[in-house]
Amino acid sequence: GENVEQHPSTLSVQEGDSAVIKCTYSDSASNYFPWYKQELGKRPQLIIDIRSNVGEKKDQRIAVTLNKTAKHFSLHITETQPEDSAVYFCAASSPGGSEKLVFGKGTKLTVNP
Amino acid sequence: EAGVTQSPTHLIKTRGQQATLRCSPISGHTSVYWYQQALGLGLQFLLWYDEGEERNRGNFPPRFSGRQFPNYSSELNVNALELEDSALYLCASSRSGRLYNEQFFGPGTRLTVL
């Protein structure tokens, strides 16, 4: 079945620096890749997503890139702020239209003021 | 609009017992997804219900089951509880069973098995 690897598991940056989180997936048929942010004690929330027909998508300080050939996608956060501190999860759709998301194990991002 | 709600917030059971967790989706959403979030393991897909039917299930034993009611609310049942079932159980809803419709998560039910 589909497998999603996420790295790093923890990431600490200084306020204002950029943060990059990378994920790889196993099945080339996956076609949808959302990213969720989970603040401490809160529910996961979608922050950005990308479909396989697009190579890059931006939303203010957040961007996601997708390399279908290499089967990896990345989350880029620029000008990080303390409120960006959270656990970030990537996910990939399962193949064959079976309509489920397979999540990575998460990256705990800490932005130091 | 009101968000996804789950009950109870916390649930403490002993090994071998049964647990029932409930989820109410956002009004207008017909799909409900269940996930298990154990420490360090991310979100593991459990079940997906759409229009009252089970559409898919993850790699969990049959003692994890559920159903979706006509009002699209859902119930997750876990039978013969084991210690490793202790986790946060998250429910999510979306407008339909198309993956690229955003999944909105509930606050979760913290299940502790003693």
Image: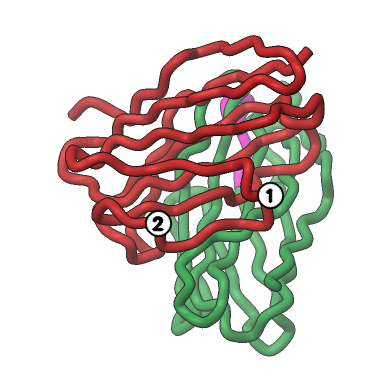
Chain colours: A green, B red
* Residue A63 shows up from this direction: no
**Residue in the picture at 73% in, 36% down:** A109
Q: Quadrant of residue A111?
A: top right
Dominant secondary structure of the residues highlighted in magenta in the image: loop
Residue identified by numbered label 1: B61
Q: Quadrant of the C terminus of chain B?
A: top right
Residue A45, image x and y in percent? 47, 39
Residue A26 in sight here: yes
Relative depth, front residue between B28 and A74 = B28
- Image point 22% across, 25% down: which residue? B2
Q: Which mark is residue B54?
A: 2
Percent position of residue B59, x then y: 68, 57
On the rendered structure, is B47 left or right of A103?
left
In this view of the protein, which residue sits in the foreground, A6 or B38? B38
Q: Quick check: B103 above or below A45?
A: below
Q: Which residues are magenta?
A: A78-83
Residue A99 shown in magenta = no
Graded by Cα atoms within 10 Å as few (under 14), some (14 to 19) or many (20 or more), the crowding at tag 1 reads: few
Disc 2 residue type?
Glu
Q: Chain of mark 1?
A: B
Q: Horizontal placement of A2 versus B52: left or right?
A: right
Assign a secondary structure to mark 2: strand
